[in-house]
Image (tube, rainbow, N blue to C red):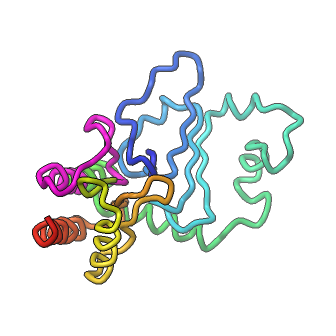
Amino acid sequence: NNTIAGTQWTVFPETGNVPLVADMSSDILSRPIDLSRFGLIFAGAQKNLGPAGVTLVIIRKDLSDRAPDDLPTMLDYRTHIKARSLYNTPPTYGIYLVGLVMKWIKNEGGLVEIARRNENKARTLYEAVDSLDFYYCPVEKESRSRMNVVFRITGDDEELEKRFVTEAKAAGLCGLKGHRSVGGLRASIYNAVSEAAVEALVSFMKDFAARNG
């Protein structure tokens, strides 16, 4: 998942005997994944897992066993595997919170239910963007992210987009400014964002378009 461009792999590439390595920091635990397809998965916790400062690594045993012996100790996954992630003092409270998040996901119905909610949230938001001439999404439909919905006001009116962000914040809808490298608008709808919150955003978008279109 690309948080800046608002794109996401929906089908993973076939790599044959070459290990498939993925940074899933921004969509880990947002949908079921066939772990057997991957040689290594790396994920920072700060989007869907828990607080910043915790990192999850899932690595195939045969790959960790093949690590070169001249790697620095802290960069060698074997160090942390052998020590059960206790080679150095871990971010204990952050790991505890990750555990609570995982229990929450399990209690909510697991990844199948989480994926259903995420699909519904993304569909609701993209349908609003596509149905209102006032907005547009620069990403082709087949590549659109379910985690980060990027969109622009038609004509790329930056002043109007700034007003959108300001008025949305006043309405309790925060963090809608696009990444500084691309501009525009962006709604990050990670696991913790409810379907009701997305509906509230869509309602605001329709109202803003009616007042400024």
Q: Nearer the viewer, residue 132 or 120?
A: 132
Across and down, in percent, residue 131 comes to 11, 51
Q: Is residue 129 left or right of residue 99?
A: left
Q: Is residue 54 left or right of residue 79?
A: left
Q: Nearer the viewer, residue 98 or 14?
A: 14
The stretch drawn in magenta includes residue 133: yes
Q: Nearer the viewer, residue 127 or 131?
A: 131
Q: How many marks?
A: 0
For the point 14% across and 53% down, which residue is it? 133
Quadrant in the picture for the N terminus: top left
Q: Which residues are magenta?
A: 121-149
The stretch drawn in magenta includes residue 41: no
Residue 198 placement: quadrant: bottom left
Across and down, in percent, residue 84 comes to 70, 53
Quadrant in the picture for the C terminus: bottom left
Q: Is residue 59 left or right of residue 90?
A: left
* Location of residue 80 with respect to 211 vertically, above or below: above
Q: Nearer the viewer, residue 20 or 148?
A: 148
Q: Residue furthest right?
A: 70
For the point 50% across and 65% down, which residue is it? 50
Q: Is residue 106 visible?
A: no
Q: Residue furthest top?
A: 16
Q: Is residue 117 visible?
A: yes
* Location of residue 51 with respect to 132 vertically, above or below: below
Residue 159 placement: quadrant: bottom left
* Location of residue 24 with respect to 212 vertically, above or below: above
For the point 87% across and 34% down, which residue is it? 69
For the point 29% across and 48% down, which residue is it? 112
Across and down, in percent, residue 177 comes to 39, 65
